[in-house]
Image (cartoon, coloured by chain):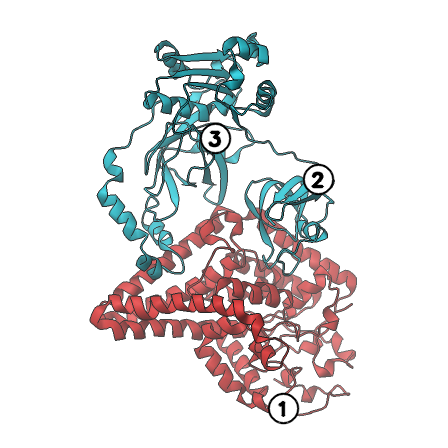
Chain colours: A cyan, B red
Amino acid sequence: MSTTDAPAMRSGQPLALGQRLLRSRVLAALASPHGVDRYLEQVNPMWAAHEVRAKVVDVHREVDVPGHPPVATITLQPTSTWRGHRAGQHVQLGVEVHGARRTTRVFTVSSPDSRHGDRFTITLRANPDGVVSRFLVEEATPGTIVHLSQAEGDFVLPDRVPEHVLFLSGGSGITPVMSMLRSLQRRTHRGRVTFVHYAQSPEHQIFADELDRVRRSGDGIDVHLLHPELGDPNLSPAFLERLVPGYRDVPTWACGPAPLIEAVQAAYDGSEALRVEYFKPPRVADAGTAEGSVAFSRSGKEAPNTGASLLEQAEALGLKPEFGCRMGICFSCTSRKSEGTVRNVLTGEESSLPDEDIRICVSAPVGDCVVDV
Amino acid sequence: MSTTTSTPTSTSSGTQASTQASTQATIDPDAVRRLTTEELDRFGEELDAIRQRVIADLGEADASYIREVVRRQRQLEVAGRALMYLPPAWPLAVAALSISKILDNMEIGHNVMHGQYDWMGDPGLNSRMYEWDNVCPSDQWKHSHNYIHHTYTNILGKDRDIGYGILRMDEDQKWHPYYLGNPVYAFLLMIFFEWGVAMHDLEVENIVSGKRKVSENKALHAGIMRKVKRQAIKDYLLFPALTGPLFPLTFAGNATANLVRNIWAFNIIFCGHFPAGVATFSEEECEDESRGQWYYRQLLGSANITGGKLFHVMTGNLSHQIEHHLFPDLPARRYPEIAEEVRDICERYGLPYNTGPLGKQLFSVAKKICRMALPDRKPAPASEPDAAVRPVAAA
């Protein structure tokens, strides 16, 4: 599906003036200590001075194979605070499932480069264990409000696009390179583009119609949709060499599941022409065992998990995180866990949410864990 | 070790422990039944079970409740600010702003900063991010309140909320002629309550006594000044200036709203730990406490206020101080439902449950403030148990 180009007046003078007013120091002083956004949201969730939110405008099923998790493209109208994105970037998106717990996940933008306040799309698979992706694909309807970060990530096209670009993707890893491809088309890129994508079967192909049009458009874009399970060649140096002679020197953007990325990295053998992106699946150990390692990201310390509370493990490494009661009631030690699973030693409850605030005095790591201490 | 109350007369008293405790507001803290280690463990498990059940049940109702309170608070705040433009509506403006500040500080601020709504993942309701409409910086308040007061509740020498370093609120605080001014200090603390709260973490009394150096307060000072500046600019400069010729009226209105909040918060908070019958503890008896013992101390060290639903909301549910101290991180709207179970547990274990109407609890607190101004009638620590000389129980 195509994205909507926002009218140019969106970033025009009147709105800029409004934004300037909303962000003024006087208004901030008047709204202190809560901040202007805490008042604006009470009137209209789409009004914001600093925060970014978006309204779901459309939910479009891209792939719906019975027995497999569906894939959908969600069109989002962000608040005027959205600063736009560069093709290939991702965004943190938080939803309030059942109106209570806000859960945030990272999704790649699938539409071409966007500017201030522009509509954009994300394309995602409803992961059977994924609270947010399932909510977005299966429950979100036009009008649903979601919370956003600004666009993030440096897996992007350079301003001066090279003469020949190679995109390698697998499964839902197609989204950032699709955003790049769409941007190149919009920028009327004159050079050569090779687009290689691996999918389970033609039925599972995301953006199939659009890619078919691109292939037949004669714009110098070579589209190769491959299905190894149906006999197409797997990714290998020999295959890449046949497709793109001298591929190691061709600027390449690759995104997909870990096995594909590992194969790509092996094939490029450390070449600087390769840029990759993949989302790491968390490793989870059984409850009650002390496996994996604990990394304290702010101090750069890491050690094997002893099974003790994160506070004790940090202290054992000579760190001095702030703490108070050491029994989970005062929240002095609350720290951000960026990766991994922790078990609340009081309740036994486990949690694997990324970027989650935890009380490290009553949280023990279950397997690998990264905490901002 | 078992937990006992530490009034001077309790040390030699073995027989009083068997006295059946009543559930009236006037409880003899020395007569509270002591639990055996096994009983304490079971007592702790029963309370843990309540906690687990509520946590498992947290969801949409709790989220919409707190959002609704926030919505009302913001509406009242905006209404209060707007009505200042209409001089005849001045009392209404002050009322709206007062209620807004009370809701912000108590049902929202106090509870959000306890982490009661952290599970919602909403940055606007997160304990680490929330800042309240009060001159005390939230991070300093969280240290003195969430950590010091809630961990060491009513342990003399550790819980600085016993008298806030200003008042004498327990007979184990050594009397000094300074305390003759107890009622006056209490009155001034009430009037300037937010300022008292803001200065609480500076531990001025420890600086006076030489236990703390002024230099240790440097960072705290800076934090307080930043917050004071923001609050003052808003309430005493910008909003009054925006009303033009009505500047003095708006200024006075904002000051009155802050005063109303101070008086209300002081009175509710003083009913939490100071009514007659609330127990205090010594550091020795709280060493190596088990979870059950910790709960036991929280229960005996707190007192509730009875009242209607709206009253509970306006107190930030601190009218359920007992439940709040047992479960400080559970959403306060759950306290009324939890209270029934807690009372049932208290009855089964023969433990007192200190509660009463606001007037009764306040009168009891006022009496204690005045009584503690004077030296104990029996100056030396009593060696013989004599109920007649125990000031608290004598009530």
Quick check: B24 above or below A265?
below
* Label 2 secondary element: loop
Taking depth in this image into account, of B369 and A372 the one nearest to the observer is A372
Instruction: Give the alpha-carbon distance from disc 2 to disc 1, as whole Å.
Output: 58 Å
Circle 1 crowding by C-alpha within 10 Å: few under 14, some 14–19, many from 20: some
Residue that label 1 marks: B375
Pointer 3 with pointer 2, Cβ within 8 A: no
* Label 1 secondary element: loop
Q: In which image quadrant can residue B172 be found? A: bottom right
**Label placed on residue A155:** 3
Are the residues flagged by discs 3 and 2 from a single subunit?
yes
On the rendered structure, is A155 left or right of A182? right
Residue that label 2 marks: A287
Residue B354 is situated, as x and y percent measured from the top left of the image, at 60, 71
Residue A11 is situated, as x and y percent measured from the top left of the image, at 27, 39
- The amino acid on which the numbered mark 2 sits, given as a three-letter code, is Ala
Residue B61 is situated, as x and y percent measured from the top left of the image, at 47, 49
Residue B77 is situated, as x and y percent measured from the top left of the image, at 34, 62
* Label 3 secondary element: loop
The chain letter under disc 3 is: A
